[in-house]
Image (cartoon, rainbow, N blue to C red):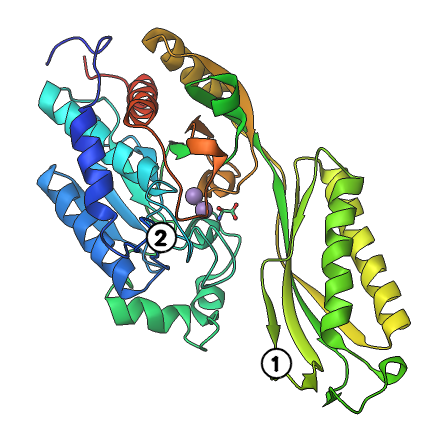
Amino acid sequence: MGRSASNLQINSARLWDSIHDTAKFGGTAKGGVRRLTLTQEDRQVRDWFREASEAAGLIVQVDALGSMFALRKGRDTSKPPVGIGSHLDTQPTGGKFDGVLGTLAALEVVRTLNDAGIETEAPLCVVNWTNEEGSRFVPAMMGSAAYVGNFTIEDILSHKDAEGVSVGAALDAIGYRGEVPVGRQKLSAFVELHIEQGPILEAEGKTIGVVDSGQGELWYDGRIIGFESHAGSTPMPLRRDALVALSEIVLAVEEIAKRHAPNAVGTVGEAMIATPSRNVIPGEIAFTVDLRSSDDAIMQALDGDLRNALTEIATRRNVETSLELVWRMPPTHFDPTIVKALENAANTLGYSWRRITSGAGHDSCNLNTKIPTAMVFVPCRDGVSHNELEDASQADCTAGANVLLHTALALAKIAS
Ligand code: HGY
Ligand code: MN
Ligand code: MN
């Protein structure tokens, strides 16, 4: 058995190199990463992850929705593995760290245990979840949502992107529709390292965020039907302008979120005029709404306020509106034993830390509905994420990976 684990630390340079190696798959001129799920860029990083995992002695399996499970044997193979990992897909204006840090830090945990000659009692499983971002295909956290049974595989495979490509066709196009039935790979627990994607840890000078809860999410697809007509000859009072109506809806979403501050946020992230033309009054628009709160009652109120606002605006502007709730994720309360294990690891390693609620959704939020789960955050520069400027320090990434290492060891136990 290798050296004692209490002073074990990951190989910081190796983790940092891996993060920058993978950033080239979909790398952008501004230094960000555009690696939408199930695209060729995603295939490249998946291939990289498979090769690196196999080089670390892991057995890689892929499920029917492309989620990747890289298994490290433990002394007691009858025990379900402890899961560690995150996602490798990014937003269109994504960065190097969102999801990538957690997946590659999990791989680094394995590499470090290999170097130290440490065998764990329970196996470990490094996971890359398919389509965490939800940007190309709805819902977000898709692979983990199906894994915990929130959606059927058939339903997910039929979801289409803006070009009409289905999840099934996209999986086949990159060769990642795996053999393993979704949910077959059991996990005894799951721990995920992620950048905070917000300003709190950096502002308070804390190295580690122990994530004990997460916001709930409401995603809507909306449509506005007005009436196309001539931009020059249609008198203002006669117009049924879908874009002006949407402009009021966008301001209403902002006002509704502020009404429930500080425990609510609201965003209109997509707006598409059906047939845009500079001299035609927009007659049909599709848009999206993303509402979040860590309080169930506030989520209820946000939904009601949004529906009331649409009805009032539609009546006053003589347009038709429709709103479909396409995805709802309740607020998350992570597992207290895993949260405690994270706190113990941060204390053992001497890092400053605080409890924190996640503003962003994560695969861990789905997993937590079925297995003991929690997350660990590290700061990102200026709290910026979902932006090509996303950045984090090597020291903080290393600290987060060390907390992940020691928490994984506490859960999987070192073989005696
Ligand atoms: O939307 C989210 O919170 C996550 O980043 N996909
Ligand atoms: Mn993420
Ligand atoms: Mn993200």
Relative placement, left or right, of 254 versus 309 is: left
Label 1: element kind: loop
- Decide: is 396 above or below 243: above
Q: Position of residue 312 (x, y in %)?
A: 88, 64
Q: Position of residue 12 (x, y in %)?
A: 20, 25
Q: Position of residue 357 (x, y in %)?
A: 57, 29
Compared across the picture, whether 216 is left or right of 76 comes to right
Q: Tell me the residue that label 2 is attached to.
A: 89
- Write down which quadrant ligand 2 falls in: top left
Q: Residue at x 37, y 70 (%)?
A: 168
Quadrant of the rendered structure where residue 157 is? Answer: bottom left
Would you say the residues marked 1 and 2 are in contact, meaning their CB atoms lie under 8 Å apart? Answer: no
Residue sitting at 81 percent across and 80 percent down?
A: 240
Mark 2 element type: loop
Mark 1 or 2: in front is: 1
Compared across the picture, whether 105 is left or right of 332 comes to left
Observer-nearest of 239 and 162 = 239
Front residue of this view, candidates 240 and 175: 240
Residue type at the position of mark 1: Ala
For the C terminus, give its image quadrant: top left
What residue occupies the far front of the structure in this picture?
A: 232
Kindly tell me whether mark 2's CB lies below 8 Å from ligand 3: no
Name the residue type under label 2: Asp
Q: Is residue 170 above or below residue 267?
A: below
Q: Is residue 59 visible?
A: yes
Residue occupying image coordinates x 37% and y 42%: 99
Q: Position of residue 405 (x, y in %)?
A: 28, 22
Which disc is residue 274 wearing? 1
Name the N-terminal-most of marks 1 and 2. Answer: 2
